[in-house]
Image (cartoon, grey):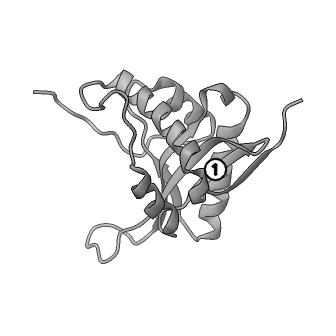
Amino acid sequence: MQQPLTIRRAVPADIPALDRLLYQVHKVHSDIRPDLFRPGAKKYTDGELEDILASDGTPVFVALRDGEVVGYAFCVHQQHRNSLSMTGIRTLYIDDLCVDQAARGGGAGTALYRHVLDYARTCGCYNVTLNVWAGNVNAQAFYERLGLSVQKTGLEQIL
């Protein structure tokens, strides 16, 4: 029987586990778009992670099973203030959500996403947004199963 998940805000002691997962999610991106993502890299330095974890504007949540971090959700509070064209809604942007390769299919991703939704509601957010790279069909299918729909589409032309 699988142990229950616990979800909480990440703390500096979680940085080694966050690093491990950051490498995993970066590999997905570098495999899909090696022209944009350097192989063997990760998104943040440990110093940047410390700053992110210390800020209420960038909450990070971790999913734990048996005391081990099996997933994370990096979030960013966003709001268009003093914009002539955009309303001032509050958005919680999921900058990154990753579940350890060995723990996928066990509900950690769904639990993290639902936790983020509950957190966003308590903060008075209007919506939760995220981006998925073209070619990351597993992530796109996962988010569509959770009820997300396309908000906008980014296009490019490589020269």
**Considering depth in this image, is 55 or 118 the residue closer to the camera?**
55
> Could you say whether the residue bearing mark 1 is in a helix, strand or loop?
strand
Q: Residue at x 53, y 64 (%)?
A: 126
Residue with the mark numbered 1: 62
- Residue 141 found in image quarter: top right
Left or right of 4: which side holds 151?
A: left
Left or right of 128: which side holds 145?
A: right
- Residue 122 found in image quarter: bottom right
* Residue 133 location (% of width, % of height): 38, 33
Query: How many marks are shown on the rendered structure?
Result: 1
| Residue type for callout 1 | Val
Among all residues in the image, which is located at the extreme right?
A: 1
* Residue 78 location (% of width, % of height): 42, 64
* Residue 85 location (% of width, % of height): 27, 68
Q: Residue at x 52, y 70 (%)?
A: 56
Quadrant (top left/top right/bottom left/bottom right) for the C terminus: top left
| 26 is higher (above) or lower (below) than 88 | above
Q: Residue at x 59, y 62 (%)?
A: 120
**Considering depth in this image, is 55 or 120 the residue closer to the camera?**
55
